Image (spheres, grey):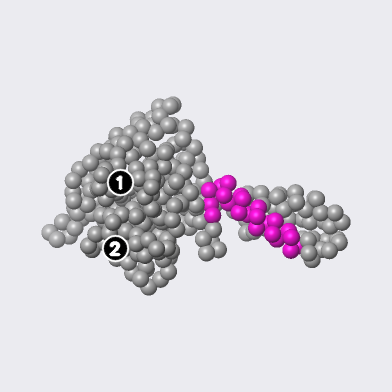
Amino acid sequence: MTLLLALLSLASAQQISRDVDKTSSEWSFDVKWKDAAGEKHRAQFSLPADEVKADLDEPLRLKTKPFHEDVAKSVNAWGKKQKGTKVKAKGTKDGVSISVSGDDARQVLKDAQVQLESARDRELKERGFTTLDGAIVPDHTRHARQYASDVAPIVEALGGPTKDARVFADLALSFVQTIPYEKASLKRDRYRRPLSLVGRNRGDCDSKATLFLALMREAYPDMELGIVYIKGHAYAAVGLEPESGDDTRRSDGIKWVLAEPVGPALHPVGEISRRSKRKSRFGRAEIVAL
C-alpha cells in the first residue's frame, strides 16, 4: 500500500492534459496541471506558428564543425590582408588550426590568435551560445531576456502579474515543472529554447530555467533575476523578499531566493532539491544575472 501511494503521488506531479491545435498561423495550447498543493490549473494560449517552428528547427546543441569552419573563414579573410605573410586557418569538428609563413610569421601568428578569439565570440553569439568558465554553454540569460515578449501569451494565460510576485512565481514555476523532463537531454549540450520547449513539451534543467526566467521577466521587468550553475545542473534565482525557510544564496550584494524549475518534483519557490542543496554547499555555484 505504501508503494502504491508513492506511485500515485509521483503521477500527480505531471501535466493532467495538453492539447494543441495547429494551424498555418498559430498553435493554440490548452494545458492542465496540478501545483505543489494539489490545486488544478489551466492555461489556454496561442503562439505564432512560424516562431514555434523556427525554435523547433534550432539545433539542440552546437554544431562544432560548421562553427569552427566559420571561425576559420573569418581568420582567413583577415589573413588575406596581411602583406608578405600567408595565413591559413582550417576548421574541423575538434577546433581551428592556424599556420603562418612569410615575413614576421611569429607576430602574425599571435595576431591571428587574437582574430580567432574575436571570431569565436562573434560566431557563438550569432548561434545563441556563450562561454562560462572556459566552457561553451547556451546563452541562457540572453534568451530569457529575448523571449520575454514571446511568452507574453503564456503570462496572460497564467493570470498575469500579481501584486504579490511570489504568487505568480509559484504558478509559473509549477507550469514549467510539470512539462515532462526530456530524458534524451542527458546527452551533453542538448538545449531547447523557450518556444521549442513549449512546442515539443519536453525540456531539461537549463531549458526549463530559461523558460521560467522569461516568464518572470515578462511579468516583472524590473525584478532581479538570474540563473544558477552548479556541476551538471542549473536552476533559477529570483529577487523576491525572502521568507522564513527559503533556500537563498547571496551574490553580488543580492540575497537571491532560489527556485527549481526542472521538475517533476513540485518544489515551491524558495525550495530546491536536496541534490541541488548538496552540490551548492560542497561544490561551486555561480549565479549569472539577467
| Quarter of the rendering occupied by the N terminus | bottom left
Report crowding for label 1: few under 14, some 14 to 19, many 20 or more residues within 10 A (C-alpha). many
User: Can you give x and y, in whole percent of width and height, for residue 211 in the image?
Assistant: 39, 47
Q: Is residue 268 left or right of residue 182?
A: left
Residue 90 in view, yes or no: no
Residue on which disc 1 sits? 172
Q: Is residue 118 in the magenta section?
A: yes
Q: Amino acid at mark 1?
A: Ala
Q: Amino acid at mark 2?
A: Asp
Q: Nearer the viewer, residue 60 or 268?
A: 268
Q: Is residue 271 above or below residue 66?
A: below
Which one is earlier in the sequence, the residue at label 2 or at label 1? 1
Q: Is residue 18 left or right of residue 195?
A: left
Image quadrant of residue 274?
Answer: bottom left
User: Can you give x and y, in whole percent of width and height, for residue 117 in the image?
Assistant: 65, 58
Q: Image point 35% across, 35% down: which residue?
A: 153
User: Can you give x and y, in whole percent of width and height, for residue 233 in the image?
Assistant: 40, 60
Q: Image point 48% across, 49% down: which residue?
A: 142
Dominant SS of magenta comes to helix
Q: Is residue 202 in the magenta section?
A: no
Q: Image point 52% across, 64% down: which residue?
A: 133
Q: Secondary structure at mark 2?
A: loop
Estimate the spatial distance between the alpha carbons at disc 2 and disc 1, rounded to whole Å. 18 Å
Q: Is residue 93 above or below residue 48?
A: below
User: Can you give x and y, in whole percent of width and height, for residue 215 in the image?
Assistant: 36, 44
Report crowding for label 2: few under 14, some 14 to 19, many 20 or more residues within 10 A (C-alpha). some
Image quadrant of residue 82?
Answer: bottom right
Q: In the rendered structure, find residue 235 and report the number of the disc placed on it.
A: none
Q: In the rendered structure, find residue 247 and report the number of the disc placed on it.
A: 2
Q: Secondary structure at mark 1?
A: helix
The stretch of residues the image draws in magenta is: 109-130
